[in-house]
Image: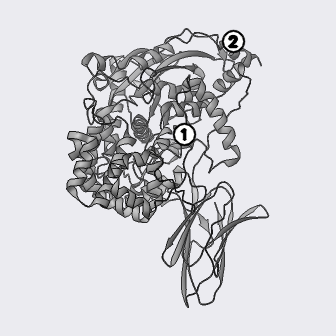
């Protein structure tokens, strides 16, 4: 109670950019926790509402335990630090660039760090392969903490580097763009240590968001690997793996299971790397798992309705309460959970033929209002996973991607994020919609002159860059649409909602929701009490496919605590997929005479799959199989569901066939 009382005393103190330390909290018998405030830029806000302030708690206790122990307080402090690397917009002058590190400098100095330094990239015009980096240090009695944060927002042309996968030959199969910038990050730390004459025992505090998170993730992985091999990473200092505290947020995947010179990305040596991920954030699914990409370390997940339906409502209530505190306005309404499957009917295509200029509006409005009734409980995570999986298959190998698609996509990103261009949108999802519109136009119109004219209507002089990208991608996208029409279309329909899950202030509220400092502070001043919302340790789902049935149905029963999923065909009549219990998702497709179904289930429990099929054919073929969503375990392969029939093909001559399959984790 004394600790809680001291926390309450800190509420209501000054929220100036650099505040004095409030009355300290006692984290334990030795170390105090002080509350400060800091400023940051929320780059999706309306003009005039872009600069915000929030609280940050800091204590030496964060670094008094091994980095291999997850610390919810350090996680939030890390996100506060990385959000302060965001930069303002315009006027893009030399003076403007020089002033860009001001928020991260103020944040670090506020919590007691000194000797603030940036690299040249932070204060110069962003380039394709640049990486803005900031560092500062804080001396304690027997060690020095060096905080390192790359610029994680407002990096403009650096965004194109995200698309530079490379063929792996120059990066040990890791993402080449992030591998190179990770090496720059390690060199920057080395230079900082030398320039500031740091000696003795050091601890690294590394954090980043989005691209910055991917770079930090790879850099920390490389440091862990070198230290594991007994190599000395930096001169004149002592650094151990348990002293590298790494927290990333919504980081894409830059490590690779095919790397030859390091241990597998999920090996225990990388357990000091913590990645906080929203499963419904599509950014975290690239670079593609199908090419072997993953993240170093441990992923911790924000819960979703699919994975944790019993706690979801409370989770979002706590998130909303804290987000309202951060937001300080009702101008922004969170819609990141607003996803449902849609189908595009033939009559909609006919309308598009006559209203081509309205295609962009179609992707942002209610043009396609036909909900896909054949899918139950799909969320953005499942739809995006299936879409990316299919698209990657159609792009071909990683080498194919580099040869055919990498350059056109990079060129598009350079145009999109070039701050000198005012005719193009500044956010990725708008351009993605435009590409989709151009692709659909190309398919439907079939006239290159009309497509070019249409593209010029919204891209002006940069239409050729979009058209080149469309020309490269139209084949794979059309092939993907043929196999995954509703997933692709629904992602476009909800692109604005999906990208909200990548807004850094949204992530900040989610992370604060699992931090007792912020929950207790909220409860001290509000009547509506909230409780801690812990992060999940995984976001994996089991997946089964059923092929070759003439008619399909699905229902869920409970049998002695075990989930029994009954897949039942029908002799006559229309097939239906009945609504399943929360936490299940069903995909249903009809290909003229036969049907296939996909079933998705959260892992961590046992299932019994009971199948009964009816067929009017004299001899009918039925296949069923199951596996986990891609999870990297080691350099040898993927983790899979264990079941008594890993894959089976059954032939039957009668009207009925039944087989039970028990899945266990």
Check if mark 2's residue and mark 1's residue have beta carbons within 8 Å.
Answer: no
As rendered, which of 154 and 202 lies closer to the eye?
A: 154
Which residue is most to the front?
A: 354
Quickly name the residue at label 1.
335
Quickly name the residue at label 2.
9
As rendered, which of 577 and 86 lies closer to the eye?
A: 577
Mark-to-mark CA distance, 2 and 1 = 34 Å
Helix, strand or loop for disc 1: loop
Viewer can see residue 65: no
Residue depicted at 49% across the width and 38% down the height? 500
Could you say where residue 379 lies in the image, as x and y percent from the top left? 55, 51
Could you say where residue 292 lies in the image, as x and y percent from the top left? 41, 55
Which residue is most to the right?
A: 560
Q: Residues within 10 Å of mark 1 (few under 14, many from 20)?
A: some
Q: Earlier in the sequence, mark 2 or mark 1?
A: 2
Could you say where residue 278 lies in the image, as x and y percent from the top left? 53, 42
Helix, strand or loop for disc 2: helix
As rendered, which of 592 and 286 lies closer to the eye?
A: 592
């Amino acid at each position: 109670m004394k600790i809680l009382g001291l926390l309450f005393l800190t509420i209501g103190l000054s929220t100036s950019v650099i505040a004095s330390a409030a009355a300290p909290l006692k984290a334990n018998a030795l170390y105090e926790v002080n509350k400060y405030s800091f400023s940051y830029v929320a780059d999706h806000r309306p003009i005039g509402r872009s600069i915000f302030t929030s609280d940050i708690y800091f204590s030496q206790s964060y670094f008094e335990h091994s980095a291999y122990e997850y610390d919810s307080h350090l996680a939030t402090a890390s996100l506060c630090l990385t959000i302060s690397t965001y930069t303002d917009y315009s006027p893009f002058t030399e003076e403007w660039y020089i002033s860009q590190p001001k928020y991260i400098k103020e944040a670090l100095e506020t919590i007691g760090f000194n000797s603030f330094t940036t690299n040249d990239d932070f204060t110069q015009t962003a380039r394709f392969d640049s990486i803005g980096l900031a560092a500062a240090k804080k001396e304690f009695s027997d060690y020095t903490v060096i905080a390192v944060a790359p610029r994680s927002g407002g990096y403009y042309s650096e965004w194109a580097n995200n698309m530079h996968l490379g063929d792996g030959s120059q990066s040990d199969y890791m993402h080449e763009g992030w591998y190179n910038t990770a090496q720059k990050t390690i060199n920057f730390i080395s230079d900082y240590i030398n320039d500031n004459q740091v000696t003795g025992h050091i601890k690294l505090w590394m954090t980043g968001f989005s691209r910055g998170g991917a770079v930090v993730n790879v850099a920390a992985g490389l440091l862990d690997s070198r230290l594991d091999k007994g190599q000395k990473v930096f001169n004149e200092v002592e650094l151990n793996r348990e002293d590298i505290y790494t927290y990333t947020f919504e980081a894409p995947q830059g490590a690779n299971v095919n790397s030859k010179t390091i241990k597998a990305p999920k090996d225990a040596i990388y357990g000091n790397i913590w990645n906080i991920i929203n499963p419904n954030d599509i950014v975290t699914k690239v670079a593609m798992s199908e090419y072997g990409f993953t993240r170093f370390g441990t992923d911790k997940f924000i819960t979703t309705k699919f994975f944790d339906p019993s706690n979801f409502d409370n989770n979002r209530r706590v998130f909303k309460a804290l987000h309202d505190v951060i937001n300080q306005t009702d101008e922004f309404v969170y819609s990141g959970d607003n996803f449902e499957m849609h189908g595009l009917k033939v009559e909609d295509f006919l309308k598009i033929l006559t209203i081509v200029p309205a295609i962009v509006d179609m992707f942002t409005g209610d043009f396609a209002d036909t909900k896909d009734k054949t899918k139950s409980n799909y969320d953005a995570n499942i739809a995006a996973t299936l879409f990316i999986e299919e698209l990657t298959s159609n792009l071909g190998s990683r080498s194919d991607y580099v040869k055919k698609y990498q350059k056109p996509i990079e060129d598009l990103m350079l145009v999109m994020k070039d701050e000198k261009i005012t005719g193009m949108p500044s956010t990725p999802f708008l351009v993605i919609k435009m590409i989709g519109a151009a692709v659909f136009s190309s398919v439907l119109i079939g006239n290159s002159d009309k497509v070019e004219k249409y593209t010029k209507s919204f891209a002006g002089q940069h239409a050729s860059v979009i058209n080149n990208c469309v020309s490269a991608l139209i084949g794979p996208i059309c092939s993907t649409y043929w196999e995954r029409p509703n997933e692709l279309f629904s992602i476009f329909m909800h692109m604005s909602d999906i990208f909200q899950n990548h807004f850094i202030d949204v992530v900040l509220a989610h992370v604060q929701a699992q931090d007792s400092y912020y929950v207790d502070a909220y409860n001290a001043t509000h009547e509506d009490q909230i409780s801690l919302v812990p992060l999940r340790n995984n976001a994996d789902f089991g997946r089964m496919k059923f092929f070759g049935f003439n008619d399909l149905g699905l229902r869920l029963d409970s049998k002695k605590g075990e989930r029994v999923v009954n897949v039942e065909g029908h002799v006559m009549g229309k097939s239906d997929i009945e609504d399943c219990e929360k936490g299940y998702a069903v995909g249903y497709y009809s290909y003229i005479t036969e049907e296939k179904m996909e079933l998705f289930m959260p892992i961590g429990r046992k299932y019994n799959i009971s199948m009964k099929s009816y067929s009017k054919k004299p001899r009918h073929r039925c296949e069923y199989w199951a596996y986990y969503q891609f999870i990297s375990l080691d350099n040898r392969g993927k983790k899979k569901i264990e079941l008594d029939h890993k894959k089976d093909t059954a032939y039957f001559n009668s009207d009925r066939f039944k087989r039970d399959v028990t899945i266990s984790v």
